[in-house]
Image (tube, rainbow, N blue to C red):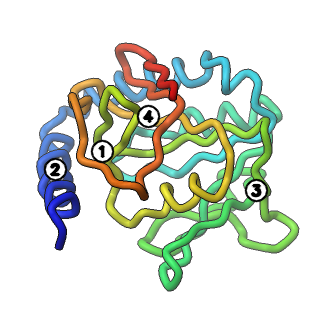
Amino acid sequence: MNSITAQKKELRAAMMQQRRAMSFAFRREADRAIAEAVLRHPAYRAAKQVLAYVSMPHEVGTRAILEAVLADGKTLGLPVCEPETCTMLFYRLDALSELTAGAYRIPVPPASPERLLVPSEDTLMIVPMLAFDGQGYRLGAGGGYYDRFLAAHSVQAVGICYADCRMTQLPHDNNDRKLASCVTEQKTEDFYG
């Protein structure tokens, strides 16, 4: 294991512990504030297609965002992970009731060919993360799915995270992709360059 991989593994464990220590009341309020900020973000308002995710217990809650995307008449895409290739594809979801259990027990949309989405310049991607830094790098779950997707597609990537999970600088390498913005319950940071 190289030095950056080892550093990330250690940081992931620390950030997961920090998330578990957050109170339910704090997270509920922070999730609400983050959702409101995402829905006000210029990239959201301009997007015709939003690629998002169904949040797991340790992640910023996305249900309000998913409901708003559908209510606003935008195309909502959710990922289906392919563990054999460590890649993911996004498929259109028309209603939250269509979700079923997928890889890693993550709820997924129906993965039929006619629902496969192709990102375009009017696509916003909402990205999960455990931590982020002032340069726009993120610490994810460690599978590299999002970095591989972002390397292959030109989309506006906005991360959502709790403000306490902002770090001065995260370890990163050539495989890590920067975000366009990060939204927390306290503020939105935009990253350029």
Foreground mark, 2 or 3?
2
Callout 1: 10 Å neighbours few (<14), some, many (20+)? many
The type of residue carrying mark 4 is Ile
Q: CA distance from mark 1 to mark 3?
A: 26 Å
Q: Are marks 1 and 4 in contact (CB under 8 Å)?
A: no
Amino acid found under the numbered disc labelled 1: Leu
Sequence-wise, the earlier of marks 2 and 3 is: 2
| Residue 27 in picture, x, y percent from top left | 30, 31
Cα distance in 3D space between marks 4 and 3: 21 Å
Q: Tell me the residue that label 4 is attached to.
A: 160
Nearer mark to the viewer, of 2 and 1? 2
- What x and y, as percent, mark residue 112? 79, 73
Q: Are marks 2 and 1 in contact (CB under 8 Å)?
A: yes
Determine the residue positioned at 55% across, 24% down. 38
For label 3, the residue is 92
| Image position of 82 (left or right of 109) | left
Q: Residue furthest right?
A: 114
Report the residue marked by disc 2.
11
Distance from the alpha carbon under mark 2 to that under mark 1: 9 Å
- Furthest residue in direction bottom, as rendered: 84
Mark 2 or 4: in front is 2
Residue under label 1, please give it: 130
Most foreground residue, 13 or 168: 168
